[in-house]
Amino acid sequence: MSSEAAAVDSGANLVIRNAVLWDGMERLDADSLVVTDGILAEVGYDVASSSAHEVVDARGGLVTPGFVDAHAHPVMAGVEALSLDVSACDSAQETLRQIGSALQAGSGWLTGGGWSMSDFPGGAPTAAALDRLAMDLGEAAARRPVCLVSADHHSLWVNSVALRCAGIDRATDVPEGGVIERDTHGEPTGTLHESAMDLMSAHLPTRTPAELRAGLLEGQRRLHEVGVTGYNDAIVGDYGGHTSAYDTYRQAELDGDLTVEVTASLWWPRGLTEDDVDQQVAVLRGQKVDGPRFRATNVKFMLDGIVESRTASMSAPYRCDCAGEGTSYFTRNHLRRAFAAVEAAGFDIHCHAIGDRATRDALDALEGIVSARRRSDVRHHLAHVQVVDPRDIPRFAALGVSANLQALWAHYDDQMVALNLPLLGDDRVQWLYPFGDLAASGAHFAMGSDWPVSSPDPWQAMHVAVNRTHPTGVRPEPLLAQQAIDLATALRAYTTGSAHLGRTRTAGRWSLGAPADLALASSNPFTTPVDHIHEVTNAATVAGGRLVHRAADV
């Protein structure tokens, strides 16, 4: 059965045998399970089946609850994949070749993204490179404005036509928290970081409802392929040239097209002040929803930027000529007041925190509102936790704040070596992605991909979490080997840990009598050599009782 056919099943009827079963917390004493009309009906040995059930031989593969991606941008990823997606390019030359093909194929604005900062000197590609490319292709291509978002979605690469459309020149003021790359004469060179992206975003064509729906369905399909049955959309709002997908999600749920469980992180705009808090919370209250497949129950605060553009918020200056400490988008008083109001309105808090100062500011603000807390069930979390002062590690468990890990980044990849290590210096490198110390302190874990920033495949992230290396890395040695975690901890994070943050009903969990939610792996990673975990693939996915993906050989 093809994935396309499976996706429309109202309820699966299947038996999975010869499997290793993991319920999201531990291995079960069983080797089979039964799904009847989409309901998880039985787990055990030698389970019975009827002629209505299709028997799947797992051949010793691991069956888990479906993975829940605790921090992803699937609609953005789907829209970009259906337009211009250069994320698979391995070099600047290959990226430019693909852009050139797209320039010749259409008219008007060329948008899309996925370019890697590590492919360009200083992480800043230039308008001049795009201009030369377009001129070589002819007058029609040279007239097209180009705007491409980076793989990490913290920067835009634009050509000179786009700069003129947006009125960005040497006299343009830089928005607070933003960076416009300039030459020695002060002229913009073609890369806009962080809030400077907003100068361009206002001039981009708005995505139509049809484009957003197509992006959602494409993102959903790709996540099902890798075993994901639920996710937290980490920005539901207008951001970086992308239109909010809130209405798209609501309509997809009404139409029965939503086969994942989605938790939306409603966007807290970076330009707000303390005086705007009450008004913004009123807006968010109007968007709060808790449906069977779509819920908007947490609020996203982007506290800082990223190390690569020197906008991650640090407690001490970067090791570079800029000598700055990065960007904090909100004052400490703003965070405390906003966090208190958001929590009182019934939302969980989801923070982007890369630098050590951003992490400390978030923990301080959350600690500051504990005494006034009126709710017992809060599920606040900090995503990324890239650079964490060791003094702050015990505070996660003490405050009940979850660490939302993007584990695939915790190795010596191109971007780490070329654009992070030189800026951080030897001392702060020892603070990178302290998963092991967080686990030892008792912190609760969730795990996600930040797709399309990086691969959505959970097995790739778990490989790095366990090994602190990856075959695609540029160095063979592990990045701080003592910060590795074991496979069981990683699996819990990517299933029940993330399901907890997302308040999912079925995704990431098993419960007899409830809609089945599971992912079948190609093998048993617990008996696979740890340095081969990345070779594990997803063979089949059941989400909300529906068979939504099945590999050809299963």
Image (cartoon, helix red, strand yellow):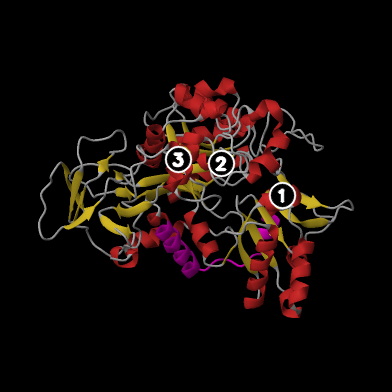
Give above or below for 47 relative to 90: above
Residue drawn at 74 percent across, 33 percent down: 318
Q: Nearer the viewer, residue 430 or 40?
A: 430
Instruction: Looking at the image, tell me whether mark 3 or mark 2 is earlier in sequence order.
Output: 2
Callout 3: SS: helix
Instruction: Looking at the image, tell me whether mark 1 or mark 2 is earlier in sequence order.
Output: 1
Give above or below for 443 relative to 301: above
Q: In whole angstroms, how far apart are the C-alphas of marks 1 and 3?
A: 27 Å
Whether residue 183 appears in this view of the structure is yes
Q: Nearer the viewer, residue 449 or 90?
A: 90
Instruction: Please give the residue where the numbered disc 3 appears in the rendered image.
Output: 462
Q: In whole angstroms, how far apart are the C-alphas of marks 3 and 2?
A: 11 Å
In the displayed orientation, state which residue is furthest to the front. Answer: 529
Instruction: Please give the residue where the numbered disc 1 appears in the rendered image.
Output: 123
Q: Which residues are magenta?
A: 198-222
Q: Amino acid at mark 3?
A: Met
Give above or below for 549 relative to 301: below
Would you say 320 lies left or right of 82 here?
right
Residue drawn at 60 percent across, 53 percent down: 151
Q: For the residues labelled 3 and 2, say whether their Cβ atoms are less than 8 Å apart.
A: no
Quadrant location of residue 473?
top right
Q: For the residues labelled 1 and 2, say whether their Cβ atoms are less than 8 Å apart.
A: no
Residue 225: say if magenta. no
Would you say 451 lies left or right of 140 here?
left
Residue drawn at 66 percent across, 74 percent down: 108
Would you say 175 lies left or right of 372 here?
right
Q: Amino acid at mark 1?
A: Gly
Instruction: Please give the residue where the numbered disc 2 appears in the rendered image.
Output: 409
Give above or below for 23 relative to 172: above
